[in-house]
Amino acid sequence: MNHGADSATSPLSRPQAAPWPQVGEDWLAAGIGALVVALVLAGVRPALPSFSWETSADLVTGVLGAGNLSRTLAAAVPIGILSGVGVLLTRGALGGFAAGFPVVFALAWISQLLAGSAAVEAWGIEYVIFALVLGLLVSNLVGVPAWLASAAQSEFYIKIGLVLLGTSILFGDLLQAGLLGILQAVLVVVAVWFVSFWLARRLRVDDELGTMMATAVSICGVSAAIAACGAIQGDRRKLSYVTSLVLIVAAPMMVLMPHAVRIFGIPEVVGGAWLGGTLDTSASVVAAGELISVPARNAGVVVKLSQNVLIGVAALLLTIWWTMRSAGAAGTRPGIGVIWERFPKFVLGFVATSFLFSFLLDRQVIAQTRGVLNGLRTMWFAMAFASIGLETRFSELVRHGGGRPAIAFLGGQAFNVVWTLVLAYLIFGGLFFAVPVFE
């Protein structure tokens, strides 16, 4: 997307030839995420800024206090350096990134500040929505010059965040909580994916865009869409379109669904499982679930984590399917090497960190590092969602495909909401299974 093309001739925006072979973005994201995890495990656990506040006094003396701002700077510098190294090695142009990164980080920081308000938390609105809205405001009202666009690396930030997300996907916790969450997750993902993809085809949406939309709706939104785009080597402009749709639709769902649980008298655990199967991020499930009850929140988290586990499986299956589909169209037979070349390598980082924290580390070490790793992951995710806003123009969303892709997405999401509620009643309503106690 070209926002602010008038500044394209700025020296900061001119592409520079890298004096070394470019490195794949997926490998770099996995490497940076692994490096962060290794440093934290080795004892490098910086005090991260706090964003919780209730009164104006809390805001001024706490979040905006000198101590918290110094912690913000201490976090921004290494995050900026690591991200900058990735940009340098993949694209060879660092000038624009260096100028634009402070702006992207500031948008991400402000989004967390707004979400940290006790009043906002009571509504269940999380930082991803504020990050998207702030980016959209800049993009649609001010414009995005080339030097700022070079720092809006939404995919790269998300991939690093996903590697860090693996540290919180513990298979032991899922199995201990019961297999019901995994059962619902599998049934939701399979049915919703095929219905969404079928609907996209019926509305004459191309298969590349339809695949990314179906994967986003059925699994976990932006993260799944990026994994799907990597698996099929899709168009990044189409990915930007899908991620924007995901977040715009997620905002009202996050607020309205917990109230629907109360209004219609849906059992708490059923409501939590419903939220976990439809909302797109673990943080949104936690926030929305807490508006209902602790059991609802815990049931939702189990279902959502079960779906997150399927990211790696989905990426592998999509890679195999798309490779065989492309080879069939060309009249050739793909080998293992082609499938490996297409597979999104950052997913390996996600699987590796999940395996490490699930089976190889002591529970005490996990507890000691969870806060820092979750905080760092949130910062990278917040920058990613702010970048998505910076990359999005409302006019392009409306015009794209004559509105058919948006209709297909909404149709898939509507089916997801209904189908997941039915499954939540069948699986977590105690009709056929003994439901575990989510306290």
Image (tube, helix red, strand yellow):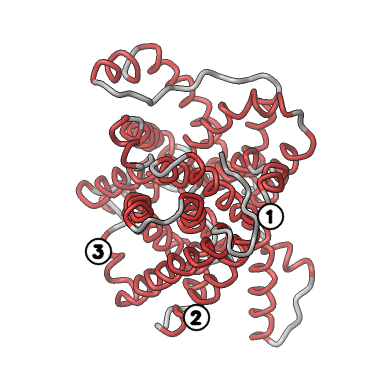
Front disc: 3 or 1: 1
Q: Secondary structure at mark 1?
A: loop
**As shown in the figure, which amino acid type bears the numbered disc 3?**
Ser
Tell me which residue sits at (45%, 78%) in the image: 200
In the image, residue 130 above or below residue 187: above
| Label 3: few (<14), some (14–19) or many (≥20) C-alpha neighbours in 10 Å | few
Q: Is residue 398 left or right of residue 300?
A: left
Given the current orientation, which residue lies at the most extreme left position?
141
Q: Is residue 88 above or below residue 109?
A: below
**Towards the viewer: 57 or 68:** 57
Q: Earlier in the sequence, mark 1 or mark 2?
A: 1
Q: Quadrant of residue 414?
A: bottom left
Marker disc for residue 179: 1
Residue 223 visible in the current orientation = yes
Q: Residue at x 46, y 54 (%)?
A: 267
Q: Report the residue marked by disc 3.
A: 395
Give the CA distance from mark 3 to mark 2: 26 Å
The answer to whether residue 103 is seen in the rendering is: no
Residue that label 2 marks: 198
Q: Residues within 10 Å of mark 1 (few under 14, many from 20)?
A: some
For marks 3 and 2, the one nearer the N-term is 2
Q: CA distance from mark 3 to mark 1?
A: 44 Å
The reply to whether dot 1 and dot 2 touch (C-beta < 8 Å) is: no
Amino acid type at circle 2 is Trp
Q: Which of marks 1 and 3 precedes in the sequence?
A: 1
